[in-house]
Structures are given as structure tokens and as C-alpha cells.
Image (tube, grey):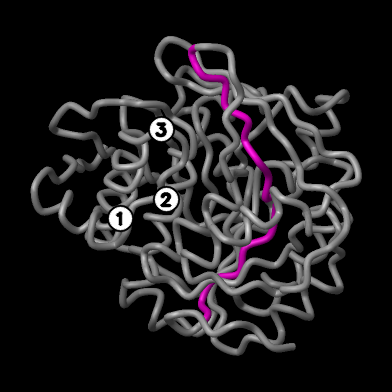
């Protein structure tokens, strides 16, 4: 298996949806933008200089070519560089008065779902420098469990850091109980979980507030860390031993829309994690131990990445230089809880 050479050794492999967001403008017209949570994460990692391998195929149609151009520009390698004949997934995106997005999906017989666990594992096995695998969002629907769950189990067993972004989309599923069970099955394989306050509500977790619900979720998994995004209220990082940190911006952030904000947040978190000595010194992900300084660095980089995204229309992931500049000029406030 031969991959186009990225700017850095391949460290992260991503698997999940790549689609076109049809974003409704003020005049009612639909504007096509490359998107999908995993695709956004993949591009965001590449644009911040992380050697990244995208595992799903892209379509040979017009939209597939647009998606391919996006990952190529980000320096991302494709495990399946030959396009497939199936069409590209579509999502119709509506924005409310605060710029918050809602989605309707069209996903039957599409290109990015033409994967299986054996192929995903084979692609990862071909990359000796791989440290992290990441998935989430539409890959967690019950119908796609046989595609992704065996792969996640195999990657965890191989010692790689498994990252799962819950990023629930309840509008796409007819059976909420099956969807919740499928998401929880994926989270059982994760070392690092990302959820939003909306995700916690959709999972039906009890708690006096989002922090309590997030702690309840972390306690139900073997994960060693959980990142909780809270929109304008910032984000938190939780440890199973009860430690927690909260990051908020210290200057106003002009919001164009929130499309891709969580994806850029997670990318920023992983970029900072890959730079930390704690990960570099761990021979297996199970051995990873993050301290207070690690947590602060991860949260600050993640929040800055997300803030730069929301200042733009659509998902516009920042470069590493842009994140560094924001951290220098307007660093988030991070405090222990």
C-alpha cells in the first residue's frame, strides 16, 4: 500500500464521513462546502502540520473531487487514493440566529461508507509511525457498527491511542435506543472522548449539570480523558480521578457560524497532545499519564483552534501559525475545578 507523502510522518489515521454541507444562506440558496465531522477533523489536523491518513474513499463525482482537493491542500494522505463510483454524501445545514447549525443527511449508498474493518486495519498496519486513530459522528450509527467497532478494538489492542468524538446527530436515526447503544459501544474502546453538552443530553445521561453528566459518562468507560465542549462557555477536560480543567476565552469572539467548531477543537487538542512528552514517552496509549500542565496546554490550544474557526463562515480550520499567534495575543484562561 503506497500513500502520497505528507509533510510529516503519518501519526494520525481518521475514519468516518466526508460529505458536502449545503449551507442555507440568508436568501434561501444552498451553498456547497466540503464538510463532515471526520473530514473537517482530518483537514484541521493536516493544516496544523500533523501527518494524517484519511482511511475512507472519496467519490469520482464533482463533489468528491472537491473533497479530494481539500485534503490535498491540507497535506493529508489518502489510504484509498482511487475514487469510487458511489456518490458523495450530502448534508443540508440550517443556521439559527446565533449561527448554530442543524443538519439533515443523505447517506444511502454513498462513497465514504464503502469501507470494512479488515480494510481499515490493513491500512493502519501499513503505517509503523501511527500513534493515534480517530473517528466519530456518523461512523457511530448502529448500521455502521460492523465497519468501525472491530477496527477500534484492534487499534486499541495494538497500543494506539483511540479517540472518539460522540458528536451525535439524532435526526439521522429512526431508533434512538440502538443509536445510543452503538455510540456507547464505540466509547468503550476510546482512550480519549470528546462530547458536547448537547451530546450528553442526547445520550440521556443524568446529572445536575453538564459537568456532572460528563463525569457520569467518563465513569462508564475505560477512557483516560474526556473533553467537554460548552459553546460560548468554553470547554473542559476531565480525568477519571476527578481532576478537571475549564478553559474560556478572555476576549470576545465574533461568531460567523459554528460549523466545524467542535472538529477544529478536537484537532487542536490532538495537535497539542502529539507535542507533549507524556505521549512521546508512552510506548502504548494505555500508559499515557497527563499532568496539570499537559491539560492546560491541550485545552488552550483546542479552544484557540475552535475560536479561529467560528470567526469564519463554514468550517475553515486554522493553520498552526494562526493558532500560535492567537495563543500569543489572546490566550484562553484555564483553571482547575
Is 228 or 311 nearer to us in this picture? 311
Q: Main secondary structure of the magenta part?
A: strand
The kind of secondary structure element at disc 2 is loop
Is 140 or 188 nearer to us in this picture? 140
The kind of secondary structure element at disc 1 is helix
Q: Earlier in the sequence, mark 3 or mark 2?
A: 2
Residue 237 figure quarter = top left
In space, the residues marked 1 and 2 are separated at their CA atoms by: 9 Å
Q: Is residue 127 above or below residue 179?
A: below
Give how far across and how far down residue 18 sits, in percent.
Answer: 67, 50
The magenta-colored residue range is: 10-26
Q: Is residue 209 magenta?
A: no
Residue 286 seen from this side: no
Instruction: Residue at 74%, 48% (x, y): give it.
Output: 139
Give how far across and how far down residue 307 sits, in percent.
Answer: 30, 38
Q: List the residue tagged with mark 2.
A: 239
Kindly identify which numbered label has been placed on residue 295: 1
Residue 185 shown left or right of residue 247 in the figure: right
Mark 3 residue crowding within 10 angstroms, few (<14) / some (14–19) / many (20+)? some
Residue 135 shown left or right of residue 280 in the figure: right
Mark 2 residue crowding within 10 angstroms, few (<14) / some (14–19) / many (20+)? many
Amino acid at each position: 500500500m503506497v500513500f502520497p507523502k505528507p509533510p510529516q510522518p503519518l501519526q494520525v489515521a481518521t475514519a468516518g464521513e466526508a460529505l458536502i454541507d449545503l449551507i442555507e444562506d440568508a436568501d434561501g440558496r444552498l451553498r456547497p462546502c466540503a464538510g463532515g465531522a471526520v473530514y473537517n477533523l482530518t483537514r484541521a489536523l493536516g493544516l496544523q502540520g500533523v501527518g494524517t491518513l484519511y482511511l475512507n474513499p472519496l467519490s469520482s463525482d464533482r463533489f468528491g473531487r472537491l473533497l479530494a482537493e481539500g485534503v490535498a491542500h491540507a497535506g493529508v494522505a489518502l489510504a484509498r487514493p482511487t475514487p469510487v463510483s458511489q456518490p458523495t454524501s450530502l448534508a443540508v445545514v440550517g443556521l439559527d440566529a446565533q449561527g448554530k447549525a442543524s443538519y439533515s443527511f443523505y447517506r444511502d449508498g454513498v462513497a465514504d461508507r464503502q469501507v470494512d474493518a479488515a480494510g481499515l486495519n490493513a491500512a493502519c498496519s501499513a503505517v509503523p509511525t501511527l500513534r493515534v486513530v480517530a473517528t466519530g459522528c456518523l461512523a457511530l450509527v448502529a448500521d455502521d457498527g460492523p465497519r468501525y467497532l472491530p477496527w477500534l478494538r484492534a487499534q486499541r489492542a495494538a497500543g494506539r491511542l483511540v479517540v472518539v468524538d460522540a458528536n451525535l446527530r439524532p435526526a439521522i436515526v429512526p431508533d434512538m435506543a440502538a443509536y445510543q447503544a452503538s455510540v456507547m459501544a464505540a466509547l468503550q474502546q476510546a482512550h480519549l472522548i470528546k462530547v458536547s453538552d448537547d451530546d450528553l443530553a442526547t445520550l440521556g445521561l443524568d446529572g445536575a449539570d453538564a459537568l456532572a453528566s460528563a463525569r457520569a459518562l467518563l465513569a462508564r468507560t475505560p477512557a483516560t480523558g474526556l473533553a467537554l465542549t460548552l459553546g460560548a462557555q468554553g470547554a473542559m477536560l476531565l480525568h477519571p480521578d476527578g481532576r478537571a480543567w475549564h478553559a474560556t476565552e478572555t476576549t470576545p469572539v465574533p461568531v460567523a457560524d459554528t460549523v466545524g467548531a467542535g472538529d477544529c477543537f478536537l484537532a487542536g487538542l490532538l495537535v497539542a497532545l502529539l507535542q507533549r512528552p507524556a505521549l512521546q514517552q508512552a510506548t502504548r496509549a494505555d500508559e499515557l499519564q497527563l499532568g496539570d500542565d499537559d491539560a492546560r496546554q491541550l485545552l488552550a490550544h483546542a479552544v484557540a483552534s475552535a475560536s479561529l474557526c467560528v470567526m469564519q463562515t463554514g468550517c475553515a480550520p486554522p493553520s498552526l501559525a494562526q493558532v500560535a499567534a492567537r495563543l500569543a495575543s489572546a490566550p484562553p484562561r484555564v483553571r482547575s475545578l
